[in-house]
Image (cartoon, rainbow, N blue to C red):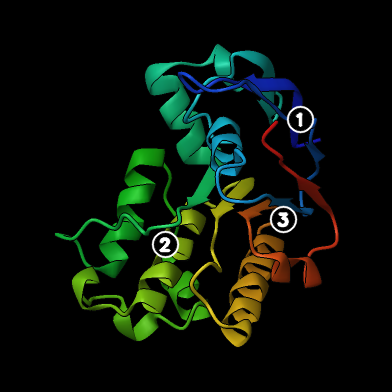
Amino acid sequence: MLLQTKGLAFTHPGQKTIHFEDIEISEGESLLVLGKSGSGKTTLLNLLAGLAKPDQGEVKVDGKVLSSLSGQKLDLFRGQNIGIVFQKPHLIAALNVLENLQMANYFGKKKNGQLVQILQDLGLSEKRKSSVQTLSEGEAQRVSIARALANEPKLILADEPTSSLDDVNTEKVIKLLQSQAEKINAALIIVTHDQRVKNHISKFIEVKAS
């Protein structure tokens, strides 16, 4: 089992505690986490990525309990094993497209000779030396996906990757994420309020604020 969560709960200051359903997912599997805005979906994603620590319960990725790691050890583990596609790309403006991917390799202390191939798979090979500031919204999103794949992670987490897309592009992005995850045998978790994604991923859980 690549990812397991047990008894997860988290409390934002001044709000009710959110209790999350237990999750188990293996390499190569896809899971959809559905929920309305404010339900706690992004909180769950942050817990799964080790960006937040649970108040109760644990997250185990590839046999490691994330809350047992801290500081540089957690950063390195995340960099090497977890690829995150944030809702907003958060690309480094001073670097070109390829350099943004190389920076992910640097932080994860990994070398990947396939970066240009990843960009090609995502239809971005001609943009590899372009400033990220010249990219369209859709291109920036695909660079964000490429960066998440740069270290060949075991777990890919995508936060609302289809929220601003029409039906055709929603299907393209989901298929893109699935095919890239399949290529490296990674588990894929998509966190979204977009019910359309259920057409493409049958296994799902719903997060509801109590």
Q: In the orientation shown, which residue stands out farthest toward the left?
A: 94
Q: From mark 3 to mark 2, how far is it between C-alphas?
A: 19 Å
* Quarter in which the N terminus is drawn: top right
Residue 94 in percent (x, y) is at 14, 59
Counting labels gives 3
Q: Earlier in the sequence, mark 1 or mark 2?
A: 1
Q: Is residue 144 left or right of residue 200?
A: left
Of the pair 109 and 68, the residue shown nearer to us: 68
> Would you name the residue on which mark 2 appears?
144
Q: Residue at x 55, y 43 (%)?
A: 38
Q: From mark 1 to mark 2, how far is it between C-alphas?
A: 25 Å
Q: Is residue 98 visible?
A: yes
Vertical position of residue 171 compared to residue 151: above or below: below
Q: Amino acid at mark 2?
A: Ser
Q: Secondary structure at mark 1?
A: strand
Task: Give the quadrant of residue 19.
Answer: top right
Nearer the observer, disc 3 or disc 1? 1
Q: Earlier in the sequence, mark 3 or mark 1?
A: 1
Q: Is residue 186 left or right of residue 70?
A: right
**Res. 4 mark:** 1
Q: Amino acid at mark 1?
A: Gln
Q: Residue at x 26, y 61 (%)?
A: 99
Q: Secondary structure at mark 3?
A: loop
Q: Residue at x 41, y 77 (%)?
A: 138
Q: Secondary structure at mark 2?
A: helix
> Would you name the residue on which mark 3 appears?
185
Q: Residue at x 80, y 43 (%)?
A: 26
Vertical position of residue 99 compared to residue 120: above or below: above
* Quarter in which the C terminus is drawn: top right
Q: Is residue 68 left or right of residue 3?
A: left
